[in-house]
Image (spheres, rainbow, N blue to C red):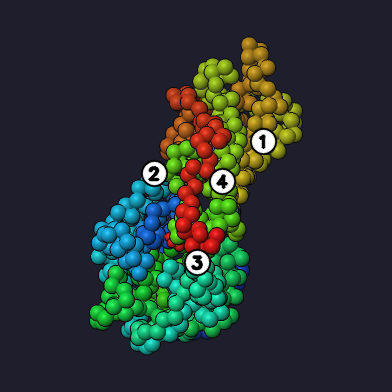
């Protein structure tokens, strides 16, 4: 059965890409991620083959608002996307990874004015800080977009004109609650009463706790209400479009209520720092519409964008789920553009139970943390401890504990055992002996050794399942469990007790080291997306060349055991004999030092 990628188009716009199997006449469509499962049959669907390569992937982070410097939460979004991007590259995909900065809106206008700077000058400075932090955390983005760039302005203007052409934008009066800090509109049900620090009665957003104000002004409205059914249809046809599943259900729940039309512009008199509405200089385009279009800008919109646009996946924090899972798909449906292939949602890092946030000031500085724990130590902690479904509390002691036990002791210890001159005086990848470790149990290997080999051979498939579900923490947990099994294998057979002058003992000794190095080779390859520097150290030390580090190279794990030959056997080890990861001292420096709490802000927010 052959498969070909199609975009399905209905009356209201494009439905997301699906794979069509079998004859056109059947009009039966299948999810790309669940080809075995029939998900949608629609009488009016029209199919257009995009010619998209199945081996390309485009991943994005949110673009970050430049009202203050980046913190660990931003780095977490970026490290997650970076890990996914590296993982796709390792699998041979042609992949693109975009991040950038969101630079328009009232908050920026106010922050620039408070800093006594021109908005663009202010944005350039803060945007540069994001870029620097990402570089220092080894975030290998392929594109960095700023919403103040000309290419983005062109994309936004074109997108706006398309929405107007399609009749999805009209001029009207918006009246309702608005939260400037969240740059979002709220229904009466999302607003609650509260008091400010002087005891004055105010209204706040139930979700963010930010103050809201009643707004009434003439502006442009987007016919969001027209798209509720199409959005429901999209999600029901694509049960994996939003992951983890709990967020998918949350969006479906939101869609059970009516969607009021959305104001998509501000009067220029209130907001000057933004892109003017084409043909109406009295109005500025709403910052969220402006910002979301960045994903298209990077893909090349409005010119040749379809190659990348058809494989786009967004990584977003749960705080901006509504914008990405409702507003953005609705805008795209209105513009008759394909919907994202996947929206990967993650929860928040908290500090003592409160969301780490620029506005609260309770931020952890990623540069200080990466200097103390190393870049890979910080990346490992974020990906290993960050569970997308639930919030996680950040604590320096947890980083120390995890990195010491899993990177320094377990992984570093294993590498050291195989490569230390005391056990490996020839400094080579030693040979494997089938008589010592045969497929049956007639050699010196015991049943736990076979279990360990089986676990490691299954590891790539397990990792693929986890990473494809955005469960990096489970993938790293599985690798860590295998590292422990390999250490137990060494401990069980204590090669240091064997007599290397005895021919049989020597064969068994070398076989033990060969098995360990094969395990390390697999761990090194699989760890590359998460901790590239640590993985490179492992692979270089055991003599694995850069062209031998792709996903396919995990398929020949312990090939000698399976009767094949090994290209690594007898190879000289790499020259770097340094430790893999140096243990971090606990409590030095002061673990609370890099948690900056702005007490004024906390007081103001009654925390
Ligand atoms: N505490 C956090 N944990 C995880 N991700 C975060 C966190 N804070 C921000 N992010 C990520 O960065 C994106 C943009 O966040 P934003 O710029 O609004 O940061 P913020 O610190 O929450 O700012 P503000 O306090 O001004 O709202 C979020 O959607 C999310 O992807």
The residue positioned 59% from the left and 31% from the top of the image is 409
Q: Residue furthest top?
A: 501
Please tell me how many numbered marks the rendered image carries: 4
**Residue closer to the observer: 180 or 230:** 180
- In the rendering, at what x and y percent does residue 597 appear? 48, 51
Which of label 3 and label 4 is nearer to you? Answer: 3
Q: Which residue is mark 2?
A: 136
Q: Earlier in the sequence, mark 3 or mark 4?
A: 3
Pointers 4 and 2 in contact (C-beta within 8 Å): no
Q: Residues within 10 Å of mark 4 (few under 14, many from 20)?
A: some
Measured along the vertical axis of the image, is residue 517 above or below residue 278?
above
Q: Which residue is mark 4?
A: 395
Measured along the vertical axis of the image, is residue 519 above or below residue 213?
above
Secondary structure at numbered mark 2: helix
**Residue closer to the observer: 461 or 334:** 334
Secondary structure at numbered mark 3: loop
Q: Residue furthest front?
A: 198
């Amino acid at each position: 059965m052959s498969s070909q990628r199609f975009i399905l188009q209905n009356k209201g716009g494009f439905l997301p890409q699906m794979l069509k199997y079998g004859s056109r006449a059947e009009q039966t469509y299948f999810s790309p991620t669940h080809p075995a499962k029939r998900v949608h049959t629609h009488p009016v669907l029209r199919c257009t083959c995009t010619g998209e390569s199945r081996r390309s992937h485009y991943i994005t982070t949110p673009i970050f608002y430049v009202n203050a410097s980046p913190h660990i939460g931003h780095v977490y979004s970026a490290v997650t996307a970076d890990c996914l991007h590296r993982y796709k590259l390792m699998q041979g995909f042609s992949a693109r990874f975009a991040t950038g900065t969101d630079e328009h809106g009232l908050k920026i206008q106010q922050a620039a004015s408070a800093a006594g700077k021109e908005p663009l000058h202010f944005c350039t400075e803060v945007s540069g800080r994001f870029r620097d932090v990402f570089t220092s955390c080894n975030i290998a983005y392929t594109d960095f977009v700023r919403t103040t760039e000309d290419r983005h302005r062109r994309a936004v203007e074109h997108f706006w004109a398309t929405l107007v052409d399609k009749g999805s934008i009209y001029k009207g009066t918006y009246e309702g609650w608005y939260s400037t800090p969240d740059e979002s509109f709220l229904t009466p049900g999302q607003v609650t009463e509260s008091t400010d620090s002087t005891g004055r009665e105010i209204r706040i957003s139930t979700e963010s706790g930010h103050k809201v104000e009643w707004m009434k002004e003439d502006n442009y409205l987007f016919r969001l209400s027209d798209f509720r059914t199409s959005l429901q249809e999209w999600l029901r046809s694509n049960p994996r479009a939003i992951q983890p599943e709990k967020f998918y259900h949350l969006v479906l729940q939101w869609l059970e209520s009516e969607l009021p039309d959305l104001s998509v512009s501000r009067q220029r008199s209130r907001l000057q720092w933004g892109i003017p509405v084409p043909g109406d200089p009295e109005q500025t385009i709403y910052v969220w519409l402006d910002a979301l279009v960045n994903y298209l800008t990077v893909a090349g919109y409005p010119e040749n964008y379809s190659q990348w646009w058809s494989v786009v996946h967004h990584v977003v924090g749960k705080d901006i789920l509504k914008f990405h899972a409702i507003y953005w798909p609705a805008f795209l449906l209105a513009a008759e553009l394909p919907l994202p292939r996947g929206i990967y949602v993650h929860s928040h890092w908290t500090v003592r139970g409160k969301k780490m946030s620029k506005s609260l000031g309770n931020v952890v500085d990623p540069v200080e943390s990466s200097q103390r724990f190393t870049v890979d130590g910080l990346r490992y902690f974020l990906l290993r401890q960050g569970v997308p479904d639930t919030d996680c509390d950040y604590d320096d002691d947890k980083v120390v504990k995890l990195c010491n036990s899993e990177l320094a002791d377990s992984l570093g210890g294993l590498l050291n055992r195989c490569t230390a001159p005391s056990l490996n005086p020839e400094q080579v990848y030693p040979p494997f002996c089938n008589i010592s470790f045969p497929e049956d149990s007639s050699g010196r290997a015991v049943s736990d050794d076979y279990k360990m080999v089986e676990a490691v051979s299954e590891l790539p498939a397990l990792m693929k399942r986890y990473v494809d579900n955005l469960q990096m923490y489970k993938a790293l947990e599985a690798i860590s469990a295998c590292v422990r099994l390999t250490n137990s294998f060494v401990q069980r057979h204590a090669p240091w007790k064997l007599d290397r002058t005895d021919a049989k003992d020597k064969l068994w000794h070398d076989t033990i080291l060969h098995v360990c190095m094969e395990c390390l080779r697999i761990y090194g390859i699989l760890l590359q997306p998460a901790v590239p520097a640590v993985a490179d150290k492992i692979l270089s030390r055991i003599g694995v060349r850069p062209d031998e580090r792709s996903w396919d190279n995990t398929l020949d794990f312990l090939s000698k055991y399976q009767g094949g030959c090994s290209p690594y056997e007898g190879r000289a080890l790499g020259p770097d004999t340094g430790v893999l990861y140096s243990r971090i001292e606990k409590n030095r420096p002061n673990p609370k030092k890099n948690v900056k709490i702005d007490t004024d802000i906390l007081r103001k927010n009654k925390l």
